[in-house]
Image: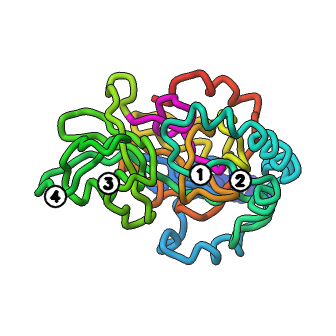
Amino acid sequence: MTSAAPAVRGLGALLIALAAGCAAKGGADWAQDGSSEPRIARGGGGWLHAPPPGEGDRDPGAGAAGRDAAAPGEAVDATRADRRGAAGAASAEDELAILVREHGRPARADGAARAAAAAAPGLAPGLFRNTYYDFPTEGGGPKDAVLYDAACAPLASVPRAFHDQVCVQGSGRLASGDTVSFARRGCACADVCPRTGQKVCFERLDPRRFPYGRGATGRPITPLRTVAVDSSVIPLGTALYVPELAGLPLPGGGRHDGCFVAEDRGIKVVGRQIDVFTGDPAVTARLNALFPSNRGVSLVLDDARCRAVVAAPGPS
């Protein structure tokens, strides 16, 4: 019995080591799940695992109800947003002078901005609704619709499907390779946009300078860097850090740094919402599979790690 004790203890140690090794491997398999692309994690921990099956199609309110509120320091302080919104409203006349792709409305009165900033319906307090928009390309088919310029002169004949996409997204690429982008709304000559009810006129842009169109600040918009906002809640030009999107797999490889710039507006972007520009419908579909629209994100305004992106090119 005495001579067998060391052997028993050695066997026990071996079994413990084997169990620990299996547990470690199991954990790695859970995080990676055999995929070549890391999947999404809730919160700011990176994209590690996929949402439960069907979650992308569920009711947005149901998703928000089960989510914890953002950690202190991550969500935008409502009072701070109001102060910034008031400053944006005070300079509305200056801002309107540089708006070339409005893709939305002028800043609302300060009282309306406070109401819009107070809450995003269906989401936990402090969160912003997240959505995506992209850059459609003219496809084939009968050219049975006309895009007009701001003077109501015909700009291009295009398929109806492309017209109905570009009047929502604000910019798109013609079959010729030229970029068209929002010029003004309320054009008597234009067809009504089915999804927005607006009559939008466009402008032809140099695709070398504006490969994805032009934002509300007059600058080119950049995929996975530009976001559209309600400028009475988040002033245009604001750098934003979005913890939930840090670690985003980029189409060209690598990971997103979580930094975005508010440089566009959308007629459907109202109150506590950010609309992330993806640049490609396929990227929009992928992001909706990984991090569905309307799940809700927290924002940090003017975060130090994101200030450089205001003047820098987008992620590659």
Residue labelled with disc 4: 144
Vertical relation: 96 (above or below) 209: below
Magenta stretch, main secondary structure, is: loop
Residue depicted at 23% across the width and 51% down the height: 146
Q: Is residue 187 visible?
A: yes
Say which mark, if any, is on residue 189: 3
Look at the image and give the residue range highlighted in magenta: 212-230
Tag 2's secondary structure?
Answer: loop
Badge 4 amino acid: Asp
Q: Quadrant of residue 256?
A: top right
- Residue 49 located left or right of residue 120: left
Rendered image: mark on residue 105:
1
The residues bearing labels 1 and 3 have C-alpha atoms spaced at a distance of: 20 Å
Q: Is residue 49 above or below residue 60?
A: above
Q: In terms of image quadrants, where is residue 160?
A: bottom left
Q: Nearer the viewer, mark 1 or mark 3?
A: 3
Name the residue carrying label 2: 108
